[in-house]
Image (tube, grey):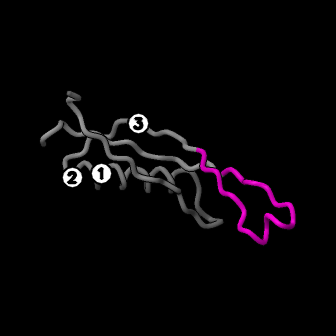
Amino acid sequence: MAQFQYKVVPFIGKVTSKQGANDVAKQLQNLINHHAEKGWEFHAISDVNIEVQPGCLAALFGASSQYIRFDQVVFRAPRGG
């Protein structure tokens, strides 16, 4: 039996035109600290590609699937904890 349980949370950094990478880092840090306070240990960041298929009308006009990449933050905690 696995000794850890995992939790995956999507992460999209949001900035205004006057903000930058440090602001996104702070958002990520806050997300990690929030889950750490609930007993989850930061484990990894992974990107996941999501296929978005066109609706019926768009498909009739030849639209094809689009792929969007999202970052996912992976946390872990001891099983049973």
Q: Nearer the viewer, residue 41 or 50?
A: 50
Taking the image as shown, residue 67 lies to the left or right of residue 21, namely right
Q: Residue furthest bottom?
A: 57
Task: Tell me where the magenta segment starts and ends, as one range.
Answer: 49-67
Give me the residue at 47% from left, 46% from top.
72
| Residue pointed to by mark 1 | 33
Give me the residue at 52% from left, 56% from top.
12
Distance Cα–Cα, label 2 vs label 1? 6 Å
Quarter of the image where the C terminus is located: top left
Neighbour tally class for label 2: few under 14, some 14-19, many 20 plus, Cα within 10 Å: few
Distance Cα–Cα, label 2 vs label 3? 17 Å
Quadrant position of residue 77: top left
| Residue pointed to by mark 3 | 44
**What kind of element bears circle 3?**
strand
Q: Earlier in the sequence, mark 3 or mark 1?
A: 1
Can you tell which mark lies on residue 3?
none
x, y (%) of residue 9?
40, 52
| Residue pointed to by mark 2 | 37
Amino acid residing under circle 1: Asn
